[in-house]
Amino acid sequence: MSRTILKVEGMTCTHCKLRVEKALLVVSGVESVKVDLASNEALVTGDAERTKLIKAIEDAGYTVEK
């Protein structure tokens, strides 16, 4: 099982954190998600493709630093 760290831009509050977590949890292959507002990072555990994770975050209205 792999771990992916994504730098997410645009998160400012707990509501943002929850939106990103929910968006990532529905991606096929994701086992768990931990979003940290202080570092603006999402730690994803599982075998999901990075491109699908990025698309889910962007579809939720946030930007992923590439």
Image (spheres, rainbow, N blue to C red):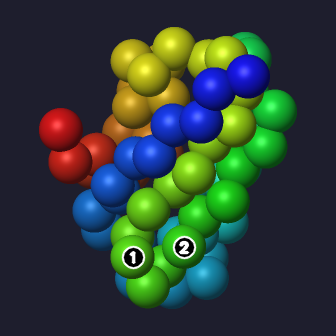
User: Mark 1: which secondary structure?
Assistant: loop
Image-based side of 52 in relation to 44, left or right: left
Give how far apart the Cα atoms at labels 1 and 2 are: 6 Å
Q: x and y percent of residue 1 in the render?
A: 73, 22
Residue located farthest toward the front when viewing the structure as drawn: 1
Q: x and y percent of residue 22 in the render?
A: 71, 49
Image-based side of 27 in relation to 53, left or right: right
Report the residue at 40% width, 47% height from top.
6
Residue 24 to residue 65: above or below: above
Q: Is residue 63 visible?
A: yes
Residue 13 to residue 65: above or below: below
User: Mark 2: which secondary structure?
Assistant: strand
Q: Nearer the viewer, residue 17 or 41?
A: 41
Residue 31 to residue 20: above or below: above
* Residue bearing mark 1: 39
Disc assigned to residue 7 = none
Report the residue at 44% width, 62% height from top.
41
Tags 1 and 2 touching, CB below 8 Å: yes
Q: Nearer the viewer, residue 47 or 9?
A: 47
Please state, as top left, top right, bottom left or bottom right, where the C terminus lies in the image: top left
Residue 27 to residue 18: above or below: above
Report the residue at 48% width, 79% height from top.
37
Q: Determine which quarter of the picture holds residue 26.
A: top right
Label 1 Cα neighbours within 10 Å, binned few <14 / some 14-19 / many ≥20: few
Disc assigned to residue 36 = 2
Residue type, mark 2 in image: Asp
Q: Is residue 23 visible?
A: no
Residue type, mark 1 in image: Ser
Image-based side of 57 in relation to 58, left or right: right
Q: How many marks?
A: 2
